[in-house]
Image (cartoon, rainbow, N blue to C red):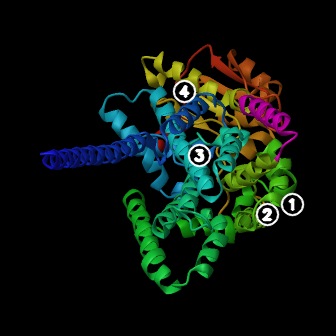
Amino acid sequence: MERGREDASLTLRGLQNRSHEKIKLRKRKSTLYFSTQEKNVRRRGDLLGENIHLVLFTIALRILNCFLVQTSFVPDEYWQSLEVAHHMVFNYGYLTWEWTERLRSYTYPLIFASIYKILHLLGKDSVQLLIWIPRLAQALLSAVADVRLYSLMKQLENQEVARWVFFCQLGSWFTWYCCTRTLTNTMETVLTIIALFYYPLEGSKSMNSVKYSSLVALAFIIRPTAVIPWTPLLFRHFCQEPRKLDLILHHFLPVGLATLSLSLMIDRIFFGQWTLVQFNFLKFNVLQNLGTFYGSHPWHWYFSQGFPVILGTHLPFFIHGCYLAPKRHRILLVTVLWTLLVYSMLSHKEFRFIYPVLPFCMVFCGYSLTHLKTWKKPALSFLFLSNLFLALYTGLVHQRGTLDVMSHIQKVCYNNPNKSSASIFIMMPCHSTPYYSHVHCPLPMRFLQCPPDLTGKSQYLDEADVFYLNPLNWLHREFHDDASLPTHLITFSILEEEISAFLISSNYNKTAVFFHTHLPEGRIGSHIYVYERKLKGKFNTKMNSELSEIN
């Protein structure tokens, strides 16, 4: 009996043990299940491969950036994008000589034309939406590029370095000034940063030859000079690739042919003939160097002025970071120097041309801040405050008059039931203001034109040059009777004294004044004046004929 009880007791313990083991197994299985759940939740909390809060913060910052840039920079941000898109969708406007000579591709304006078309179909094509929606779209793309730069640095180094590179990128005054503008240089910079995310840098975990080469090809189509910063990077990839033939035949060649075919088809549709605009662009700007018509600078300008200005107060940190950065990132420094050297060979130079390599410089600035110990807080305060001042001044104050005056023209148009009864003549250096994309009204307008001479004349003067030689004589000769006078004249304040006799004799009164800049120079004054004629006559035949050409 006792032995039987012992057997029963052992059996019961065995069952209890097995029961406990089953419970433990269920617990372990449950733990695994919940960890998978947590991972899925974590993935759902990501956007663009990063924390969703970081991404949303970057987007919000760039949207704020967009609304805090209310100044003009260069004519191309309107005349090579928004004006072309407006003409494509609404069938009136003005196309500059680059489009008649087929030097520009319709690929970039097509992005904004698509936005305009959607707004038009929805009946929401108000002038304010036509102005701001394209810029907001560009701001979103710039935000994506910022996040990609952060992600890349986190892969190549660590979160601390990535954080300081991200801080430098967001805090750069020139990036703030440019990244929401509808410039081909802005899109080139965005595509360059995202392409670098997929480029096979040492330590990168996101390398993809097809993706990065597609983005580089798209940048080349939009702005052919994008090939300049990418030349050393492509050469390095080719040299380090063990399967060189495979890289060319299965990656670069198919991508190149596909993107070039897309560009050819788009331009065939809008030009009406087969055109390789990338070749025309490089031929005009590089081979023939005809860009000098718009100004030339000494060879050292980028090193002595251009590069230091766009870097601003980041310059000492960039130099410091160049000494600290690992050798594996030397290719980024080579790319910066190569770009500066190549652009230095061209006579016509602008700050925006070297904007695409500015994010490369922020990598070295981030290294500098990472290694600062004693002076880190003062350095951060100095960088933040100095760049904040420059960003707000250039974004809200410097060269804002040419945009403010367009709001006045909008009122002239919408306050006149008969659109043809009002007429505008902009007597300023050509392309100083936007045009119909910022008015969105078929109001007769005219400006001083300045196409370059493509025939090789040695003493060529465009209409703007002839006007500024003797403005008063030009006005008396051009508007010989009252019927030919426009109802409104727009000019820089610097011209008022010289043409005052014409203004008085033609009954023009100053009706609006807009601040433009604290740094007037040459033909550009500190203010913009709007003059309205008391006795409104009919618009002249010449301006009506020009409007018919525009339509």
Residue at left 69%, top 41%? 167
Residue at left 82%, top 42%? 313
Label 2 Cα neighbours within 10 Å, binned few <14 / some 14-19 / many ≥20: some
Q: Marks 2 and 3, how far apart in space?
A: 28 Å
Q: Which residues are magenta?
A: 372-393
Can you tell which quarter of the image residue 513 is in? top right
Q: Determine whether, in the image, residue 176 is placed left or right of residue 57.
A: right
Residues tagged 1 and 2 counted as in contact (Cβ below 8 A): yes
Q: Tell which tag, 2 or 3, sits nearer the viewer.
A: 3
Q: Earlier in the sequence, mark 1 or mark 2?
A: 1
**Element under disc 4:** loop
Residue that numbered label 1 is attached to: 300
Residue that numbered label 2 is attached to: 344
Q: Marks 2 and 4, how far apart in space?
A: 43 Å
Q: Marks 1 and 2, how far apart in space?
A: 7 Å
Q: Marks 4 and 1, how far apart in space?
A: 45 Å
Q: Tell which tag, 3 or 1, sits nearer the viewer.
A: 3
Q: Determine whether, in the image, residue 362 is placed left or right of residue 550.
A: right
Q: Marks 3 and 4, how far apart in space?
A: 44 Å
Residue 358 pos. (x, y %): 70, 52
- The residue under label 2 is which amino acid type? Ser
- The residue under label 3 is which amino acid type? Asp
Residue 506 pos. (x, y %): 68, 20
Q: Earlier in the sequence, mark 4 or mark 1?
A: 1
- The residue under label 1 is which amino acid type? His
